[in-house]
Image (spheres, rainbow, N blue to C red):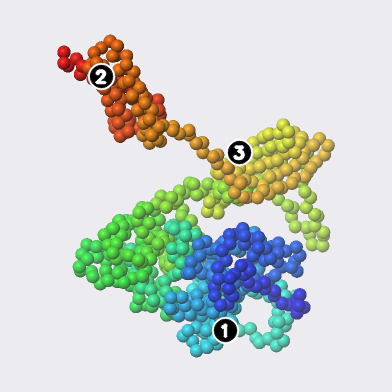
Amino acid sequence: RGSDGNMLVIARDFPGAGGADRLTQDEVSTIRKSLEQLKQVELAPFFAVTGNAEQPNEIVDGLLVSHIRYQGFQGNIRATTRPISFDQQALGQIMALPGFSGWYANGGLLVSDNLGTTAVRDFYATGGGQFQARIAARDAFLAGNDLLYLGNIKSDDAPDSYTSVVRTLEFFAQKYREDPAFAQRVDASVARILAAKLKLYDAFTFDNVIADPSPNPPATEAESADPESGSDISFQIARNAATLISPTQQDLASVLPLPPGPSDRIVFLTDTVSGAQCSGCPTQPWFASDAMQNAALRLYGPQGGNQVEEFRLKSYSFENLTALLDAPDDNQFMADDLGAADWVVVSVAGSSNSQPELVSRLLRERPDLLLNKQLILFSFGAPYYFDTTTLSRFTAYYALYSKQPEFVDVAARLLFQELTPSGASPVSVPAVGYDLIAVMSPDPNQIIPIFLDLPPESATPEPGTTPEPTVAPLFRIGDTISLRTGAIVDHNGNPAPDGTVVQFSMLLTGEGGGILQQVESVTTDGIARAAFGLDKPGLLEIRVTSEPAVISEVLQLDVSQSGAVAVTVVVPELTQSAQPTPLPPVEEESDSFVTPEGYPRVSAWSLSMLLALLGSGALFAIASLFLSRRTTLRLALGMLIGGLLAYNLLAFGLFNLTGWLAETGMPGVLTVILIGQGVGLAGGWVWSRADK
C-alpha cells in the first residue's frame, strides 16, 4: 500500500451503483433488482475485497455507502423510502450477509457518501420542508455509518457550510452528553475507528502520529462516569426488550416511512399510573399523562435537533378520554386537538381499569377524530389485551413491558424511528397470530451445526515451549464417536428451549444402505449431545434433525477393518429445495353432469328430459294396447309431469338435496327422476279413475 502502509483504503459506491439510472449526487435513484441479482452483479466486487478476499492485503478497510435505494433489500420502493445510506434496517441486512458479516465483525468501517449533495438535500426537503444538516448527519450515523463525509453540507437556516458543520458538531456533542443510546453508538464507532488506526502503526503513540503532541486533556466528567451505571443497564434492557407486535418489520417501512416532522401535530393519550411508597406517603405519578411528551421534547425538541415543536404537542390522560366519550360537548377542546392532529399516540399501562376497552370504545364511537392519522399504540404492560379488529386500526403497535423512564425513552425513540425494535414477545399474542410455542420451536431455515464432542484442550504450554499441533481424531471399528450440535435456534434467533428433542441418525450410504442407529437427545442451552458405537464398516454419515428443522451439517467417515479414519464435515446449502416439497394436490374427478355445489348441469338436464320423454312415450305405446285412449293419455301425462317436477326439485336445490346430489352425481339425478315418474304415474292412475 501507499504511504508506507499508513493509509486506510475505502471502496466507494457500496453496495453498487452500476444499475443506477442517474448520477447519485444529483438525485436518489432506485435499483430494482432482487437480492440474488445484486449478489451476482453489484455485490460481487465488494465480496472479493471483504469476506471472500484470498489475501489479507486484498481486504479493504472500509466501504463508502452510496445514496441509492435497492429493491432487493428495501422491498417496495416509494418516494419516501430512504436511501440505503440512511436506512438502518436495510444496511443491517446487507452487513449480515455471509460475505460481509465476518469482515465487519473484524473491524471493517462504513463511511457515508457525501451528505452535502443535491440528492440528499432534495430528499430531505421533499414536500416543501427545510434541509437540516444535523438531521441528515444524525440519520446517516444511526443507519450504521461510522464516518460521515459532510462535504459542502449547508442547512437552509445557516449562512454557509462552515456554520452548518459547527452546528452539526455541537448537536452531536450535546446529544452525546444527554442521550445514552447515542453515546453508546458513538463509542462503538470511535472504537472501530481507533482499532483501524492502530493497525497502521507499530505502536499507538502520539510520536508515531504527530511530531509535537500536546499534553493529554484531563478527562471530562462524562468520560469519568461509570459506563456500567444502573441507568445505562436499564436503558440497554429497555432497548433489547422493545418489540414490534404489528405490522411486520418488512411492512413497517411501507405503512410508516417517515417519523413525525417539525410541522406535525401529535396528541398523546396516556394511561396514567400513580401510587405511594407507603401508607402515609403522598401519591406520586409513576406514569404521568405527559411522560411521552416530555421524552419527545427532551430528545427531539429545541435541545435535541428541533424535530418537534412544543406547541404542536398535546397530552391527555385516559380520564380525559373517558370524559370526552361520555360528554363530548363539555370536552370540545380535546376533540379539536384530536381532529387537528397528524399523529395520535396511545400508551397503555395495563388492563386493571378496562383500558383496552376504552381504546376500543374510542375507535368505535369517534372514528371521525382519527381519520387520516398515524395511530401508534404502545403497551407498557402485557401485549395481548387487544383483539384483531382493534389492532387493525393502528398503524403500528409496540410492546415495552415496563413503565420505567428508560422504557418511555425507548418508546419515544421508536416513535421517531431512531431505534429499530429487536425484541420478541415473551407471551402469545393471538390477535396477530403470534403463538409462543410455534415461535420457540426450531427454525426450519437453519443448518444445524454438528461437531465432534472432544474433551477440553490441555492447559496452555509453558513459555518457551512450542505448542503441539492439534491432531485430528481418528476412528476405527469398535470406537465410540461422541457428537454435539451447535446452538439450535428458534424462530426468534434465540437458543431453542431446554428439552427440545433432537434426533441424531447414523446412515450407511451406498447400495444396501440405510439407517444404522438413531439416538434421541434433548437440548441444554440450545445444544444436544449423543454418542454412536462404530460396529460396521462402510461410508457412514451422521445427520441431525430437530423438527421442523431438518437440515444439518453432515459428518462423513469411511470406516474399514484396516485402519483408523478421520471425520469429514459436509455443509449443505440452505435453499428453497431444502424445505419438504409439498405434494401436488390430487384433483378429484369432477362429475360433468353435476356442479360441485350439487346442481345439475345442462348435460344432466338433457338426459333427464330424454328419460322423461322416453318413459312417457313407452308407457303410452304399451298402455294403449290394453286401455282406453283417455286412460292411456292421463297415465303418460302423469308420468311426464312427475319426472319434470322431480327435475325442478333438483334444479332449485329444494329439500337440501344439493349435498346428496354432489356426492351421488348423475345416478342421483336419474334416481330422483325415476321416483318422480313413479309418483306421477300413480297420480295419473288416480286421475283416470276419478271419472268412473
Residue type at numbered disc 1 = Asn
**Where is residue 624, by image quadrant?**
top left
Please identify, in this view, whether the residue under mark 3 or under mark 1 is nearer the observer: 1
Give the secondary structure at mark 3. strand
Q: Quadrant of residue 551?
A: top right
> Looking at the picture, does residue 192 appear above or below residue 422?
below
**Comes first in the chain, label 3 or label 1:** 1
Which residue does the image show at 25% across and 19% down from the upper left? 633
Sooner in the amino-acid sequence: mark 3 or mark 2: 3
Whether residue 380 can be seen here? no
Q: Which residue is tagged 2?
A: 633
Residue 168 percent location from the top left of the image: 52, 81
Kindly report the distance in space between the C-alpha atoms of the residues bearing marks 3 and 2.
82 Å
651 lies above or below 180: above
Crowding around mark 2 (Cα neighbors within 10 Å: few <14, some 14 to 19, many 20+) is many
Residue assigned mark 3: 520
Count residues near mark 1 (Cα–Cα under 10 Å), then give few for <14, some for 14-19, many for 20+. Answer: some
Q: CA distance from mark 3 to mark 1?
A: 64 Å
Which amino acid, by three-letter code, is at mark 3? Glu
Label 1 residue SS = loop
Q: Disc 1 vs disc 2: which is toward the camera?
A: 2
In this view, 616 is above or below 166:
above
Residue under the point 70% across and 66% down: 49
Q: Residue at x 44, y 78 (%)?
A: 129
- Quadrant for the N terminus, please: bottom right
Front-most of residues 327 and 677? 677
Instruction: Name the residue that disc number 1 marks.
Output: 152
> Measured from the top left, where is residue 106 in percent x and y?
67, 65
Q: Is residue 540 left or right of residue 243?
A: right
Evaluate whether residue 677 shows in this view.
yes
